[in-house]
Image (cartoon, helix red, strand yellow):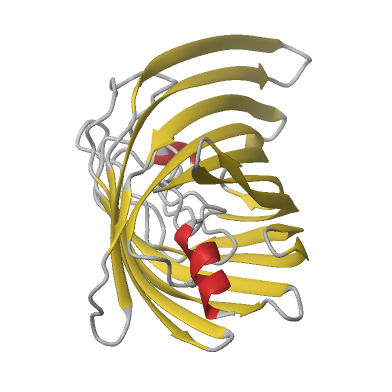
Amino acid sequence: MKQRACLWGTIVLGAIAPCAHANEIGLSFWRPGQMGSMAAVPGEPGWTLPLVYVRLDVNATDTRELAPGTRLTTRAKGATNVLLFMPTYTFERPLLGGQPSIRLGVGAGRSRSAIDVSYALPGGFTSSGSASDAHSGGADIYPSAFLKWNNGVHNSMAYASGVLPAGSYYAGRLANVSQNRRGLDLGGGYTYFNAAQRAEFSLVGGVTHYGSNPATDFRTGKTAHLDWTASYLVTPYAHVGLVGYLHRQLEGDSGSGATLGNAKSRINAIGPQAGSFLEFGGLKYYVNAKAYKEWGAKNRAEGWNFWLTLVALL
């Protein structure tokens, strides 16, 4: 039982790297959904090499009545593709009774954005305009550290995850890969894993603190998030289930770049997932696919996102 749990824990689905996107449209450096199945289960000591592909498609519409009979409508949409390499090392020596591990995420991506604006005045007069942009480049750097404990079918975790602004960014562009700001996320999680009953359930929550974007003087307020997964093991080495997340902004945006004022954002999502171990060339691999459909957005874009993860177990 414990050996099988360690094998599952070694895949390190928890805290898959955040997706690079601009906070100014309400998307955080902490990408909801990045915590996966078995997030709090300790793994086997040594190296694992996760490769993560993330696809996001989002859109948003905002209509404001600036004066009686005068209406401004803004429609924005974007798509992002990111590929991240995330070497992870799990230490053999325990720390505070738990198993420590560290990880560094690096990669590249391509972002596309488009915006349409229409202006309606009394008497039927209208005016409109549009703009679009696309950009490819390196992503930011994402360091993380974890400490995990096991007690039978119960597993717990504490983590710290951050972002260092080292990716491609140009002020004034509609589409950017980097966020051009620092961030720190602190949190913890719990996983119930019972191989005999073929059941797994994980909850991971945290609070994200943001630095300011010096190019725009925009700072996102503190946010809270909760990621969850529920899986059924169809075999000892394959599972299917559901995933979801909740994301809430606790403090309003600030700085001269916060043109919408003290705005707070929120989003919810749910979707399917499946994962399995494979063997090829004498090595073990784990592959996982999951998709999220978002709803209930406020002061941010919403849409869907897809995650494909391949982990080499060394």
Q: Is residue 21 above or below residue 156?
A: above
Q: Residue at x 62, y 66 (%)?
A: 228
- Can you see residue 94? yes
The image shows residue 107 at horizontal and vertical percentages of: 35, 30
The answer to which of 285 and 112 lies nearer the viewer is: 285
The answer to which of 61 and 122 lies nearer the viewer is: 61
Q: Residue at x 57, y 19 (%)?
A: 115
Q: Residue at x 66, y 27 (%)?
A: 73
Q: Residue at x 42, y 46 (%)?
A: 17
The answer to which of 121 and 301 lies nearer the viewer is: 301
Res 168 quadrant in image: top left
- Can you see residue 302? no
Q: How many marks?
A: 0
The image shows residue 133 at horizontal and vertical percentages of: 48, 12
Residue at the extreme front of the image, as rendered: 282
Res 97 quadrant in image: bottom left
Q: Is residue 97 above or below residue 138?
A: below
Q: Which quadrant does the N terminus fall into? A: bottom right
Residue 249 vs residue 118: left or right? left
Q: Is residue 199 above or below residue 181?
A: below
Residue 189 vs residue 276: left or right? left
The image shows residue 274 at horizontal and vertical percentages of: 72, 50
